[in-house]
Image (spheres, helix red, strand yellow):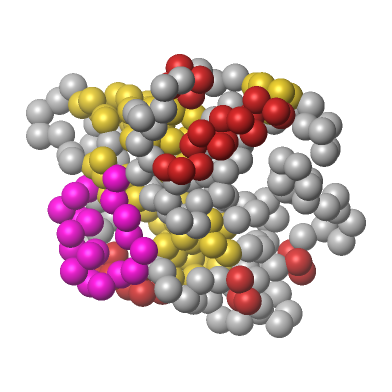
């Protein structure tokens, strides 16, 4: 792509080329509802690719409001957002359907040191995390999981909490597109086939983040890739991403 720089950033995805047969069937313990007929764009929707596993909602009296996947009128969604907001990590951005708290569910099979069972989650075995931390990588925040393994010698997985920090460059987006909704902040554009990062929006204080506008895309730096390869950590693939 004309004007793009050399590739210092990479997209993280599950590595389908390795012979791991592990399966994780899990959801985050709590979640925000989707919304019905947003007063800004008129749409009914819920995302869920923004997840904050460090959040502990147990002090909230109405915990049942965060345990069922559903859609609610916008006013109720806003009310629930305000209950959650005091417990969020700095830099968190809420969206309808956002996952909160530890990943809870069942797992079985063989896994690599890193696992991305959905594009917007990244799990790492605790021993591998300690090795990455020893490399001085920035922005690695590990959160406990509540995964149940029905097997011997089960791995000890933690989930990395990955904050939204960067954006796609306008050059890779359709020239005619709807503006960001002023109420629900929905960005109604499909992920471009040739994703180009906006270099001016990328953080320089962390080696792992997700995009603000395409939050299902987890991005890491060259330093993160080099450390994983040097340490022999497997289970995910690193796809180069150009920036401009």
Residue 107 colored in magenta in the image: no
- Please say whether residue 152 is visible from this viewpoint: yes
Count of marks overlaid on the render: 0
Residue 243 sits above or below residue 36 on the image:
below
Residue located 65% across and 71% down the image: 198
Image quarter (top left, top right, bottom left or bottom right) of the C terminus: bottom right
Image quarter (top left, top right, bottom left or bottom right) of the N terminus: bottom right
Give the residue furthest to the right: 176
Q: Position of residue 5 (x, y in %)?
A: 61, 82
Which corner quadrant of the image does residue 184 belong to? top right
Q: Position of residue 222 (x, y in %)?
A: 41, 74
Q: Is residue 94 left or right of residue 160?
A: right
Q: Position of residue 31 (x, y in %)?
A: 49, 29
Which contiguous range is marked in magenta? 125-143
- Please say whether residue 188 is visible from this viewpoint: no
Q: Is residue 64 left or right of residue 242?
A: left
Give the residue furthest to the left: 152
Residue located 47% across and 60% down the image: 209
Q: Is residue 244 left or right of residue 37?
A: left
Q: Position of residue 135 (x, y in %)?
A: 23, 72
Residue 84 sits above or below residue 7 on the image:
above
Residue located 56% across and 37% down the image: 82
Q: 231 or 85, which is in the foreground?
A: 85
């Amino acid at each position: 792509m004309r004007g793009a720089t050399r590739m210092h950033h990479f997209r993280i995805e599950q590595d389908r080329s390795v012979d791991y047969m592990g399966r994780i069937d899990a959801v985050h313990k709590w979640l925000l509802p989707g919304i019905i007929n947003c007063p800004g764009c008129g749409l009914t929707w819920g995302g869920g690719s923004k997840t904050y596993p460090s959040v502990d909602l147990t002090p909230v009296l109405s915990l049942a409001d965060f345990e069922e996947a559903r859609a609610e009128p916008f006013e109720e969604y806003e009310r629930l957002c305000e209950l959650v907001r005091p417990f969020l990590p700095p830099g968190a951005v809420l969206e309808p359907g956002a996952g909160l708290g530890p990943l809870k569910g069942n797992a079985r099979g063989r896994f690599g040191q890193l696992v991305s069972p959905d594009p917007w989650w990244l799990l790492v075995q605790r021993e591998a995390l300690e090795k990455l931390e020893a490399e001085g990588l920035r922005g690695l925040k590990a959160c406990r999981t509540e995964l149940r393994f029905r097997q011997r010698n089960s791995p000890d997985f933690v989930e990395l909490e990955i904050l939204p920090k960067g954006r796609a460059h306008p050059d890779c987006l359709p020239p005619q597109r709807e503006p960001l909704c002023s109420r629900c902040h929905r960005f109604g554009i499909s992920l471009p086939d040739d994703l180009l990062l906006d270099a001016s929006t990328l953080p320089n204080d962390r080696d792992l983040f997700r995009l603000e506008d395409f939050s299902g895309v987890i991005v890491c730096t060259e330093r993160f890739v080099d450390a994983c390869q040097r340490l022999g950590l497997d289970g995910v693939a690193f796809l180069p991403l150009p920036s401009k």
